[in-house]
Each structure stands twice: as C-alpha cells, then as structure tokens.
Amino acid sequence: MHVFVDAGADRRIRRFYWIQFEKYLPAAPDVRYDYSTPLNLRQQLWNLPFRTRARFGSTADAPQPGSDAAHVRGLLARAGYIFPSDMMNVRFVHLADDAGDTGTGRKEMLLFYMEDLACEGVAATDLIAGERINDRWAPIERRLLARAKQAFRVAKPRPGR
C-alpha cells in the first residue's frame, strides 16, 4: 500500500493517490475478488482491462473498522493531515489473473484517486435527491474520471520480470 498526498500548508488534503497490490494466499484456493457487478464499469486503460467506479461522500462517514480505507484514514490522520468535509474518488482495479476479463480474480492492483469535492463547488448533499444521486453528479463524475486517468500511468512488466 502506497499513499501520496497533495495538501495545503495547513495540511488540509486537496487530493491523494493510493496504490495497493493484493492477492489471496494459496491457503484460500477458492476465494476470489469480484468486481463483475455493473457498478464497476469495464474499461480498457493503459492497454489493460480495468474495473472502474467513481463515488462521493462525507468524510464524517467512518469506514468499516479494520478495512483498508480505515487503515489509510488512520495513517493520514496520524501524519497530521486534515480531511475535507466531502471527498470524491475513483477506484481502478486490474485483476492480473483474469485472462477472460470476467471481473473476478485472485491478484489485484488497485489505484485510488481522491479529491476534495469542494473543488467542484458542491457538497455531497448537493448531489443527492431523496436517496438517489441527482443529475448534477454526472458531469462532475466525467471530469473526475478524466483527472484520475491523467493521474496514473501503468505499464505492463517486461518479459522476464
């Protein structure tokens, strides 16, 4: 897990990048990561298949205890970084052993790109109508995805590595 932060002099987070590699151990031979749901958009990026999902929300909503998100939040908080009220993010997942591009596999590379939602001039509550995401999210999501894709470069390993 690698985390890179862009913050102001006040240590308030503007954006951060989180890169993570995981795989299931042989002791759990039947377990797989599953990103096959329609919520995870299939895209070809950097000449590799990825599953992509963009989201937004309040940073007051605590991540699940013990989760990777909780670990990253704690790491940044202990380093003195201050989270904005609301953030938006894109998660890119590449399953290295998913030759059939099914959205399932045992070896994953995760790339997360997160930004302060205020950079778009809105709060998370502005993007919700009742319990549904409203039409204001779609253009923000497109711009976020474009910035997130520009934030990373991924290359296949050379043969023999």
Image: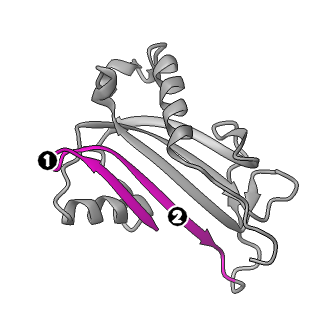
Most foreground residue, 105 or 46: 46
Q: Residue at horizontal 23%, vertical 37%?
A: 85
Start and end of the magenta stretch?
A: 1-25
Residue denoted by label 1: 9
Residue denoted by label 2: 20
- Contact between labelled residues 2 and 1, with CB atoms less than 8 Å apart: no
Q: Quadrant of residue 44?
A: top right
118 lies above or below 85:
above
Q: Compare marks 1 and 2 and give the one earlier in the sequence.
A: 1
Q: Residue at horizontal 67%, vertical 45%?
A: 51
Q: Which mark is residue 74?
A: none
Q: Quadrant of residue 80?
A: bottom left
Q: Classify residue 45 as left or right of residue 100.
A: left
11 lies above or below 122:
below
Most foreground residue, 102 or 47: 47
Locate the C terminus by quadrant. bottom right
Instruction: Kindly identify the amino acid type of the residue bearing the numbered disc 1.
Output: Ala
In magenta stretch: residue 96: no
Residue 88 rendering spot, x and y as whole percentages: 40, 36
Most foreground residue, 64 or 79: 79
Instruction: Kindly identify the amino acid type of the residue bearing the numbered disc 2.
Output: Gln
Q: Residue at horizontal 65%, vertical 41%?
A: 40
Q: Classify residue 58 as left or right of residue 51.
A: left
What is the distance, in whole Å, between disc 1 and disc 2 at their CAs? Answer: 27 Å
Most foreground residue, 85 or 156: 156
SS category of the residue bearing label 1: loop
Residue 21 rendering spot, x and y as whole percentages: 57, 67
- Majority secondary structure of magenta residues: strand
Q: Classify residue 142 as left or right of residue 70.
A: right
